[in-house]
Image (spheres, helix red, strand yellow):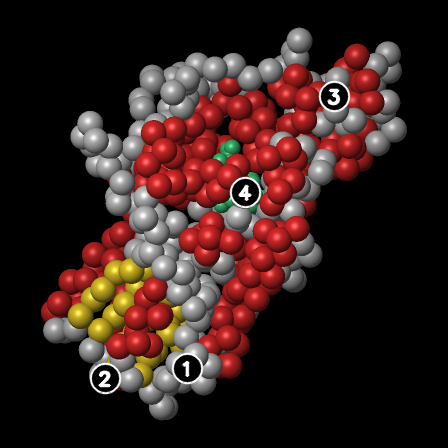
Amino acid sequence: DTVIVLFNRDLRVHDHPALAAACDEARRVVPLFVADPAMPMGLRQGFLAECLADLRESLRERGGELVIRRGDPVAQTMRVAGEVAAQAVFTASDVSSLARRREGRLARECATARMEFRCFPGVTVVPPGALRPSGGGDHYRVFTPYWRVWKDHPRRQVLKAPGMVIVPDALAPGPLPVPRHGPHELFRGGETVGRRRMTQWLRHCVSDYADGHDDLAGNRTSKLSPYLRFGCVSPLETEALAEGGDDFVRQLCWRDFFHQVAQAFPRVNRDDYRPRGHDWRDDRDAVQAWQEGMTGVPIVDAGIRQLLAEGWMHNRARMIVSSFLVRRLRIDWRVGADFFAERLLDGDVANNYGNWQWVAGTGNDTRPNRTVNHLRQARRFDPEGEYVRRYVPELAAVPTRSVHEPWRLPVGVGGYPAPLVTMD
Ligand code: FAD
């Protein structure tokens, strides 16, 4: 008998429940990835191509193959199922509306073809929907009570990579997608690199996380987000190995939290989770200045320029640049979130839009009117101005006391704009 394992953003062989079950239960397994031209991948396309190459290599080392097709994932899966006379399709559940529609269609097509269709966990530590508030409701709206039950909820076992994967003969592997850009300097895609980063960071650096994670210049966070985004590392295994890293594990819980919100509120990327009747400003010049890292506010520009240069931004900088856009410039959160979604290597629906709505006060923040003092944040989290100087070279020679407020200097800084808004 033959089972198809449809991969999506779970591009790994370790701790992969669907793959492990298929290898246990079936004689032949077809690991399949369908590149969907309708899927907005933004700048993540190159990273994805590397993930697929690496997954193919790992499966080949186990005697298997990664079969790659292009087109509508449901139609292509059913087509491959026909070619190999498969009895079942296994896949990992996901929360975005696109993923849920795909699962629904697959379930129906499989039923019509009299094939089994089974969904597995693996995208989060605790499956979205597994925890429900005792007072009623289908999900947690507030983080702290979620965290309290989440950390004590029993975990499934972390699974080993399968020893052997036997694919049916005579199935064309299909070409790897060709990336449009050269390889990313800081983040190479794939499970091999991701696992190495995960194990080394957890061994050597996690103990410094509680003190260091807000240090903008210090690079003291894990930078695992692109690997978690594509499932190159298992969130459950990451948690299991994070001994003594409570603050770090709490961040994995935030990730789970936003996934269960997105599952319950699939329009999280379009509609206010908690409508507040904002009147957003329409100011194209301000949006453009923000998107180019030319607002004249160094800490904001440094964050955006880190994003433009690296496809990644420090969490503290994400909070500063996003709240600057929605609170100071009063621009609709959707404008900023869509820009992030396109540029971030780790950009995903649940985390990106969940965090943006949190910052905008339309989401899960229990204090939606909190104010952020951007200058105070800059002085606190980048006290020497090192982060600003790294990403805003125009300010390289500005002394520390003025680096966050160059408008206080008696003469302007060549090439660097005056601030878009008054900053005192
Ligand atoms: P670490 O600090 O090492 O944390 C470990 C992991 O925990 C991260 O890799 C991530 O998977 C998870 N995590 C950490 N913080 C959060 C958080 N606030 N919410 C959800 N998960 C979290 N994260 C994304 O993965 N994708 C996004 O598209 C995204 N968009 C964001 C937009 C805004 C406006 C803000 C404020 C935050 C956003 N985040 C997003 C959350 C966070 O900034 C990143 O996950 C983090 O900076 C990634 O760096 P790291 O891997 O070094 O994180």
Mark 4 or mark 3, earlier in chain:
4
Give the x, y percent position of residue 147: 38, 35
Mark 2 belongs to which amino acid?
Asp
The answer to whether the residues at label 4 and label 1 have Cβ atoms under 8 Å apart is no
Is residue 288 visible to us here? Answer: no
Q: Quadrant of the N terminus?
A: bottom left
C-alpha separation, residue under disc 2 versus residue under disc 4? 43 Å
Q: Return the residue at label 1.
A: 164
Q: Secondary structure at mark 4?
A: loop
Residue at the spot 79% in from the left edge and 26% down from the top edge: 384
Residue in the foreground of this view, choosing between 159 and 143: 159
Give the x, y percent position of residue 412: 83, 18
Residue at the spot 34% in from the left edge and 64% down from the top edge: 17
Badge 1 density bin: few <14, some 14–19, many ≥20, Cα 10 Å: some
Residue at the spot 60% in from the left edge and 15% down from the top edge: 373
Callout in the foreground (4, 3): 4
Q: Return the residue at label 4.
A: 245
Mark 3 belongs to which amino acid?
His
Asked if the beta carbon under badge 3 is closer than 8 A to the nearest atom of ligand 1, the reply is no
Badge 4 density bin: few <14, some 14–19, many ≥20, Cα 10 Å: some
Mark 2 or mark 1, earlier in chain:
2
Q: Is residue 105 left or right of residue 44?
A: left
Q: Which picture quadrant has residue 187?
A: bottom right
Q: Secondary structure at mark 3?
A: loop
Callout in the foreground (2, 1): 1
